[in-house]
Image: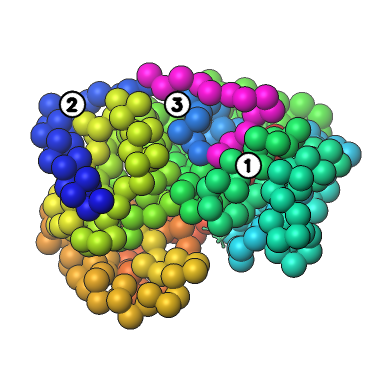
Amino acid sequence: MSSFVRNAAGGARNAVRRNQNRAPDNVQIRHSNPPHLLTLADLSPAQITTLIQNALAFKYVYKNVSPRALMSSLDKRTVALLFSKRSTRTRVASETSVKALGGHPMFLGKDDIQLGVNETLEDTARVVGSMVDGIMARVGGHHEVETLAKYSPVPIINALSDLYHPTQILADIMALHEHYAPTPTPPRPAEGEGSHTSVLKYFQSTVDPIKSLKGKKVAWVGDSNNISNELLVTLPRLGMEFSLAAPKGYDTVDERVWKKVTEAGTESLVTLTNSPSEALVNADVVVTDTWISMGQEQEKADRLKAFAGYQITNKMVTDAGAKEDWRFLHCLPRKQEEVDDEVFYGPRSLVFPEAENRKWTIMACFE
Ligand SMILES: NC(=O)OP(=O)(O)O
């Protein structure tokens, strides 16, 4: 499979030079009924823009007007949070978001219900979906969230699968947009009814994340995983370049993901390589993630060996020729082996705004 990556990289490198300013927007909107969110690949750039505008409005109103001024769009509604894996950010963001929108978040961990153990995913989707208004599901294999979506009568949001993590990448896009285009101050609305609507209208007319991000280069240096997959199928469609460096043996890009890239016609904006310095040339943004994801703990010794030389440091990124004002993202939780403290806690790091934005972007998805 790594030869697939190398072959794809060869094609991508040549094409990037020819198409630096291209902003592909040719992806069809694929909505089933109800509208699930399994990957951002299923949303058009315009829909992603709408979610970011909504998230910015939620953040602004909550912090600068009043939490009471938020639309109560989940009034009397229940969202089931089906989590078969641990979570800090996604769980806290989801529970607080449902509550802030006037709804009831029902957390169901792996020991709480019969999810895939004593009852099939199909039956679970039918039964739980008949009693709640939406389901946020953190699963193992992506087929699990696809099965839930196939049989659920209410919307399913993917809270992480082994293939994709759409709500994480919405937060990344929001954090980058805020960095490159600080949020304008809307005319101050009066507290109470209508203030949220007026802020949202203002952001819909003034905020354009595609404009602020188009042409930026994002370099991923680390394991090829669900986060890099989601970036691959999303950022190039916003007109951004995406380069991915992973060591041989850890550089597999899943065929389902690459199919989405080719369907979108965005190969030209993608570089796949085994060389961190090649990926980092001219990068505006550097991203990494843990080298040892949930369930890979047994592979720790092998992985630490394979990823030698991949730790993000100021020297490594600067020596490779990244842009002078490069910034750093990490979805968290973080371990020191993949990025040192100087970068992680330093002025280039956007990791904590990125983490906070999990809440506002998830709120936008629920709304
Ligand atoms: N980034 C992320 O998904 O964090 P959690 O696993 O803590 O939800």
Residue 166 higher or lower than 20, as above or below: below
Tag 2: amino acid:
Asn
27 or 173, which is in the foreground?
Answer: 27
Q: Position of residue 199 (x, y in %)?
A: 64, 29
Residue drawn 38% across the image and 40% down it: 257
Q: Are marks 1 and 2 in contact (CB under 8 Å)?
A: no
User: How far apart in space, not on screen, are marks 1 and 3 (Cα)?
Assistant: 26 Å
* Disc 2: which residue: 19
x, y percentage for residue 115?
A: 72, 56
Q: Which residues are magenta?
A: 26-38
**What's the residue type where badge 1 is placed?**
Thr
Residue beneath disc 3: 45
What coloring was used for the rendering? rainbow
Residue 196 percent coordinates (x, y): 71, 31
Is residue 65 found inside the magenta-colored segment of the image?
no
Q: Residue at 83% of width from left, 48% of height from top?
A: 104
Q: Nearer the viewer, residue 353 or 116?
A: 116
Q: Callout 3: few (<14), some (14-19), or many (20+) C-alpha neighbours within 10 Å? A: many
C-alpha distance separating marks 1 and 2: 38 Å
